[in-house]
Structures are given as C-alpha cells and as structure tokens.
Image (cartoon, rainbow, N blue to C red):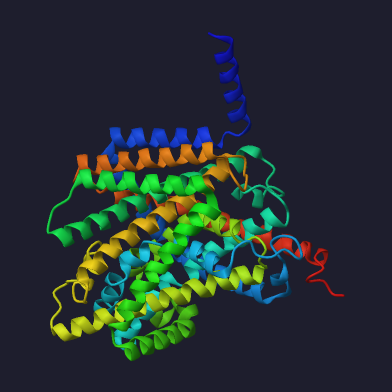
Amino acid sequence: MLPCVKTGIIKIFNAYRKNPLLPISIGILLVSTIIVFIATRETYNAIEMASIWVRNYFGYFYLYLGLGCVLLLVAIALSPLGKIKLGKKNEKPEFTIWAWTAMLYSAGMGAGILLRAVQEPIFMQQNPPYLSDLPSDILALEFTFYQWGFTAWAFYGLFAMTIGYYLFVRKKKVLISSTIEDILHNKAARTGIDVLTIMTTVFGLIAAIGLGTTQINGGLNHLTSSNFGLVTTLLLTTLISSLAFYSAWKGVNKGIQVLSKINILITLAVLFFTFSQSDILKVVGNFLEASFHYIMDFIPMSLAYGNYDPGLAFLTDWTFYYWAFWLAWAPFTGIFIARISKGRSLRQLLLGVLIIPSLGTFFWFSVFGTSAFQLIEGWESYNNEFDGVFSSIFVFFGNYPFATFLNITTIVLLIGFLVTSVDSAVFVLSMFSDKGKKDPSKKHRLIWSLFIFLATIALILLGNAKPEINILIAAQKLLIITSLPFAFFMVFMALVFVKELLRHHKSYPLISKK
C-alpha cells in the first residue's frame, strides 16, 4: 500500500474513532435497509405490531407529557428565569422576528398544513371526536387546533430552550447529549442518545419526503388528468434533495433563511386570497370562537378527561399518532430553532414558539376549514370529496377562481416546504456529526444530503416493488416507536434542565435581586 494512502486511511480512522456518530448512524441505517429488503413483509408486520403496542400502552403518557411540557414552558417564560438571554447580556437577536418566525415555521410544520388543510377539519366535522354542545364546525376546528397547536410547539420549544441554553449560555456543543452530560458521565450512553436522535431524524425526513412527493404526484395527476408514477416520484425526490443540498450548502443566512421567507410569503398570499374569496365574517367568527374554546378546554382535552375523551380508538388513530410524530421531530426542529434564537431571552423564545405559529396555524385551518364547510353546505350532499389526504386541497381549489394557478402554486409550496424541512435537518445532522459545531463543514452537509437522498430512493423503490406493503406508512409507524425513548428522555432532560436553572438562578444579574 502506498504510504500516502496508508496515512490517509489512518487519519480518517482516527477522526471517526474520536467522533463515531457518523459511521455508527450510517452503519445502523444501512443494516436496517438491508433487513427491510430481505424480510420486507416480516419487518412491516413487526413495525405495525410494535407501533400499536406503543400507542396502546403509552398513548396516555404522551398526552400527560404534552400537557406537562406546555405548563412547564409557560411557567418558565412568565417567571424571572424567562429573562435569561441566550447569549451575552447586550447581544441582539441574530435574526429579525420575521426571519426567525419564517424559519421556525417552515422547519416545524411546512408541508403538513397543506396536507391537512381541508381534509382534517372536514373529517372532524363529519366524525366528531366526542359529544359536545358546540356546533359541529366549531368542534371540528377546536380539535384540529388541539392537534396542531400549543402541544406540538411545546415539544419543539422544550428542546429549543434546553439546547439554546447549553449552547449559548453554557457554551456546550450542539448535541442532545450535552443537556445531560453533567449527570450522565458514561460516554457510550451519551453517544447512544445522539445516534437515536440522528436515526429518528433521518426516518422522519424519509417519511416526509415520501409523503410530500406523493401529494405532489396527486396534484400533478389532478391537474393533467394523468397517472404519473414511479419515474415522476424519483425525479421529484431528486429535485427536492438537490435544492435542499444547495440550501444547506449555502448555510442558514444565505440558503435556509431565504427559502423560508419565500415559502411564508407564498403561503400568506394563498391564505389571504382564499380568505378574500370566503365568507370573511364567518371565518373570523369561527377562528375566534374555536380559539376561545380551545384555550378554555385545553387541560381536559389534554387529559382526555370525562366528556372530552374521544375513546382509545380515536385517540390511537389521531392524537397519539400526532403526539408521537411531534415528539419524533422535536429534537431536530428544536435544535434548529435553538440555532436561530441566539440573542433572544427564554421568554421571547418560549412565548414566540408557543403563540406565533399556533395562531397562524389556527387562522389557516379556520380559513380552509370554514370555506370547505360552506362548500359542502352548498352542495347539499357530501360524497367524501375531501377524504383524500393527498388530493383534498386540489379538489378544494377546483371550486375557486384561478384554480389551475392555485394548484400549481400549491405544488411549488409543497416543494418549497419539503426543501426547507430537509435542508434544516441536513444542517442539524451535520452539526451532530461534525462534533457539535454551530456551523458544520460543507463536507458533512454533502454526506448527509447524499445519504438522505439515497435512503429515500431506496424506500420509494421498495414501496413500488411490493405494492401490497406501504413503506411510507411503515416509516411513520417507525417514528411512533422511536419517539417513545425520547418521551422518557424528555422527562429526564427537563428535570435536569430545571434543576440547572434553579441552581444557577443567582448567577445571572438579569434575574438576581439587586
């Protein structure tokens, strides 16, 4: 072997021996992919059984954890601890409130609000979760708000607050394990926590890209009355992955921030056009009434208490799944929000994360939900036109002026939101594998972009090779399984973090008594 080659191999080996996150994570994911190829049906059945077991035995724990996160974040935000700044005492926020909101919303929700904009409110109206004295339209919106509101953002906010504190106040690395390294001294255990975070993030991305490209395919088929299949899906995946890599390569300021702003501007344009074509007073009235009842009913809904209990079957299909999904996305989204929150106080971060995106989401669902309710009322009979998750919003826009333009814009938005979700995840994964650096090397961004692209292609090809097995749904169910360890870890992390804040309470001039 040539001396220079031998020296290069030794350097690479020593580098990854000191920082094993990248090879371990990729190795586990490659082995998992091979197992799926070899035993597809058996793997799917195992994932199905495990996900049902988790939701049946730990679903209510998810509910209690969600409520606990919301109450904890509100308590810290309103307490003197909320004055703690993520950075130096006189440091100003790195990003404006507009740029900050655009990036956190694009990373945290994105394509999901397009996927469910019409389908979910209509489902809740046609299938009320529980008996209520409220009108069916208001109850449908209230329960939709509940599943997309404070709890989802509290999961994100807890990680954002904790990582932001350890990153900008304690000057630690951007790693989940950094939040508990003062308590947990075992390096192997800390590495295991980071590997689990990476794997959960990658599986979440694969599921998101797969679902997003499927909806884009549905839109293209609806617009052209065609039947685009595998080749189109692969081309869309290539396009999205390429744009995401370019954005991540450019970094937060030049790439992710710009795309996020464009996404939000187009989203707002679509939202306000739809709003202007709707019954404005009815939309505003429903928004205010449903928001009021959501706030008033939040605690009993969060506990599924008494008359607010939809039953195990409904919770399993909807709320347990949503809570597990938000939990699975919380580490990567929370870390990204922390990364862009330098210079903000804990109060600004927490109240901003809880209130701003929640209200925006509530208004979004009020506009589309109320408009869809009125369309159905005008039809006098409903034949499940909005039941299709991947086609409902395209069917909806078919009843509005400039329908073709709106549907094309929706497809562009889907691509944009997928890109901003993937590029922010690539950036976070690169921070993990590059020793927790705030600005990871472009080599790591390239590695993760390429690996996520190849893993997504593999899943899509596998799903088409065996049509009787839905690999994308299997990936979602896998998130429910992998989120369970995070649910327990979040409790531990929150306890350690609160203890840390209280222990250092007198160390911060901003919150100490003079």
Q: Where does the C terminus fall, quadrant-wise? A: bottom right
Question: Residue 499: x and y, percent?
Answer: 72, 61
**Would residue 504 appear left or right of 325 to someone viewing this image?**
right
**What residue is shown at x 53% (from left), y 49% (from top)?**
251
Q: Nearer the viewer, residue 387 or 276?
A: 276
**What residue is shown at x 42% (from left), y 81% (from top)?**
306
Above or below residue 127? Residue 85 is above
User: Does residue 411 show up?
Assistant: yes
Question: Residue 267: x and y, percent?
Answer: 38, 69
Residue lying furthest top: 1
Residue lying furthest right: 514
Tally the numbered discs.
Answer: 0
**Would residue 506 appear left or right of 75 to someone viewing this image?**
right
Question: Residue 446: x and y, percent?
Answer: 47, 38
**What residue is shown at x 57% (from left), y 25% (from top)?**
12
**Would residue 428 appear left or right of 457 to someone viewing this image?**
right
Quarter holding residue 363: bottom left
User: Does residue 486 show up?
Assistant: no
Q: Nearer the viewer, residue 465 or 417?
A: 417
Quarter holding residue 111: bottom left
**Would residue 436 appear left or right of 244 to someone viewing this image?**
right
**What residue is shown at x 26% (from left), y 73% (from top)?**
123
Above or below residue 66? Residue 41 is above
Above or below residue 465? Residue 419 is below
Question: Residue 253: x and y, percent?
Answer: 55, 55
